[in-house]
Amino acid sequence: MAEKKTAKRNYLNRQQRRQQLLDTAASIVDEQGWSGLTMISLAERAEVSRQLIYQHFTAIDELLLETIKYLFGSLYQDSQADFNQQPSDIEQAVQAQHRHYHEDLSAGRVRALWTILFTPYNANEPIAKAARMIRRLSADVPAAAIPGLVGVELADDQRRQIGFMIDMLFWGSYSLVSDGEMDEDSALELLLWMLRRFKSGESAGLPPAFRKSGK
C-alpha cells in the first residue's frame, strides 16, 4: 500500500504572524484607504480567523495605531534624523523630506498618510484618534531646525507648533504637484524660496505667546 503523504503546513510564531498581519493591513490601506481596514477585512485577506486577529490586536484602535507605526515609523525617523543632523540648514532637510515623499513612497501610501494627517479629531472615531497621534509625531520632525529658521530660541512646545506649520507648507507643495498645478522640481524650488525668505526677512521679534507672557 502506498504511503499517504501529508502536506506540511508552515506555522508562524507569534512575532512572525504579527508581521504577516501588519503586511496584510498595509496592503489593504494601500489599495482601499483607511476605510477598508477592519478586523473582518484583515481576517479575510490574511485567511485567518477573526479570533486570531483579536489575539494580536484587541480592538480596531490598536490595529490602526500599529498599522500607522508599521507604515510610517521608519519614514518619520529618517525625516527627523535629516532635520536633527542639519539643524542650521532646514533647506537640505526639506529636500531630503521631498525625496522621501515623492520617490520613496508609493502613491497609495502617500494618500494614506495625507488622509490620516487631515482627519479632524473626534474622540469617538478610532481613525481620528490615530490621526491626532500622527500629527503630534509630524510636529516633532522639523522641531530641531526651527530656532535656526526663526532666529530665536524657543521652548519645546513652540518649536513643535511652528514645526507642524512648516510641515503643512510641505504638504501644500505636495498637493500642488498631485493636482497637476506644478511639477515636483518647481514645487520644491518655490518651497525652498519661501523658507529662505522667512529666514532672511525682517526680524519679527518673539512669537506672540512669548510677547504676551513677557518671556
Image (cartoon, rainbow, N blue to C red):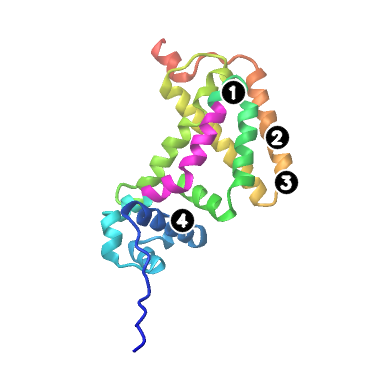
User: Callout 3, which amino acid?
Assistant: Asp
What are the residue bounds of the magenta stretch?
Answer: 65-83
Any mark on residue 11, and which? none
Asked whether the residues under the numbered discs 3 and 2 touch, taking CB atoms below 8 Å apart as contact, a structural biologist would say: no
Residue 119 visible here: no
Residue 187 visible here: yes
- In the image, 34: left or right of 179? left
Can you tell which of label 1 and label 2 is closer to the viewer? Answer: 1
Mark 1 crowd level (few <14, some 14–19, many ≥20, 10 Å Cα): some
In front here: 161 or 47?
47
At which x and y percent is residue 79? Answer: 54, 34
Asked whether the residues under the numbered discs 3 and 1 touch, taking CB atoms below 8 Å apart as contact, a structural biologist would say: no
Indicate the quadrant containing the C terminus: top left, top right, bottom left or bottom right.
Answer: top left
In front here: 75 or 13?
13
The residue that disc 2 covers is 190
The residue that disc 3 covers is 183
Task: Return the disc, 2 or 4, that comes first in the chain's sequence.
Answer: 4
Distance CA(mark 3)–CA(mark 1): 26 Å
Q: Please, is residue 196 above or below residue 165 in the view?
A: above
Can you tell which of label 2 and label 4 is closer to the viewer? Answer: 4
Q: Please, is residue 213 above or below residue 96 in the view?
A: above
User: Callout 1, which amino acid?
Assistant: Gln
User: Callout 4, which amino acid?
Assistant: Ala
Distance CA(mark 4)–CA(mark 3): 28 Å
Asked whether the residues under the numbered discs 4 and 1 touch, taking CB atoms below 8 Å apart as contact, a structural biologist would say: no
Task: Return the disc, 3 or 1, that comes first in the chain's sequence.
Answer: 1
The residue that disc 1 covers is 86
In front here: 159 or 44?
44
